[in-house]
Image (tube, rainbow, N blue to C red):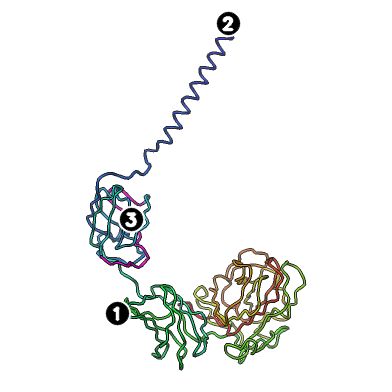
Amino acid sequence: MKSWNMNKIRYIWLLIVVLCAGSVFNACNDDPDKYKIAGGVPEVYYVRVTDPASADSLLVEAYMDNTICIVGNNLRSVYKLYFNDQEAILNTSFITDNTLIVAVPKEIPEVVTNKMYLITKKNDTVTYDFGVQVPEPVVASISCEYAHDGDIAILYGDYLIDDPDIPLTISMAGDIPVTEILSIEKTQVSFRIPEGSEKGYISVTTLYGTSRSKFQFRDDRGMILDWDNLNADGGWRSGNLDDTDPEGISGLYVRFQGFMSGDSGNTWDEDAFCFNLWGVSNGRPEGDLFDTSDLNNMLLKFEVNVVENWSSGALQMIFTPWDLSNSNGYYTDNAYPRGLWRPWGSTGNYTTDGWITVSFSLSEFKYAHDGATLELPGPGNYGGLTFFVYSGGVNGKDCNPNICIDNIRVVPAE
């Protein structure tokens, strides 16, 4: 009887523990801090910048994609928010009864009312006067910086807006107007390079203002290899040069061509897919090939034309010191970081429609031979340059690529 009573007591205690645990679990699920949409309607007092130090800076308008703070009352009742006819994305983590932090939509409104619309879950709407500013055009890059007069090129950027009353216009360096614009989208414009175009910046004008390109057309600053006046002679492999099939973008170019295995470690014809510029062997002045005073703000650029399908390996780019020569040990050690270009990676194969410009920040030169990450070295390590395509560690498909490269240069990022 005593044993039965003890078992019964243990059972009762176990039942109590289970019931208590369930109560605690339910209490945890009933989170008192969970965001809840309030009833009623919101009230807006004013709009300010989000920086607390500038909280007294009130706003009556803001640029697209800028973050603002709406100050008012019962702002948790806001279920949807529109600026003109564009809906904003609400994050409940940034909404309280008295403040609502939100980014102005980055899509250009089709119907401009210069108002924001705060809508409740019951579709009650409160309007507040607030304008959305569209930025000046952004001209970030061009399909080919060395395009010929008469060629079709594409400008890439943002806010490239054409208006019936104030059409978008393009001006080449020297105030040479573009007279043939083929298509316009918000992020790109296709046009024909006018006759007499010169080296320099390109300007784009819209109804929202005028902006200058972040690059120079036909930029020859920091030129390292153009294969006509500056080549890689003097080392083991100066590169296989050509100027036909395809036609060069500006004279001679270096060509990487031949069979490339899809499997890493297979036979590789180094002579067909490599050049070594060793500064001391090439007769370059002792020192670096370009201004290295601001390495993190420099871009390596070149023109490339991939004529035949490329689907294996990566283009590896390595800067080396001026006095390093007669050895390619840096291919397989971790002495100098490299940049990697593998444009076929996302699609499985890659060709170009003629010549295009490729751009790399020197900060992207961070990979070791074994895939580790290396620090960008300081000045004194940029007196030589090697390009090679190799399938080691970058598997793909068997291919016979024909990769043409010209005008290798390092320029300031702007």
Mark 2 or mark 3: which comes first in sequence?
2
Circle nearer the viewer, 1 or 3: 1
- Residue displayed at 70% across by 87% down: 234
Magenta residue check for 108 = yes
Q: Quadrant of the N terminus?
A: top right
Give the spatial CA distance, label 1 vs label 3.
35 Å
Can you give x and y, in whole percent of width and height, for residue 121 in the image?
31, 48
What's the magenta bit mostly, secondary-structure-wise?
loop
Give the spatial CA distance, label 2 vs label 3.
69 Å
The span shown in magenta is 94-113
Disc 1: which residue: 165
For the residue pair 100 and 371, the one nearer the viewer reads as: 100
Q: Are marks 1 and 3 in contact (CB under 8 Å)?
A: no
Can you give x and y, in whole percent of width and height, for residue 317 in the image?
63, 75
Disc 3: which residue: 101
Taking 27 as reference, is 172 above or below it?
below
Going by the picture, which residue comes out furthest to the top? 1
Disc 2: which residue: 1
Instruction: Bin the neighbour count of mark 2 within 10 Å (Cα to Cα): few under 14, some 14-19, many 20 and up.
Output: few
What amino acid type should be assigned to the residue bearing mark 3? Answer: Ile
Q: Are marks 1 and 2 in contact (CB under 8 Å)?
A: no
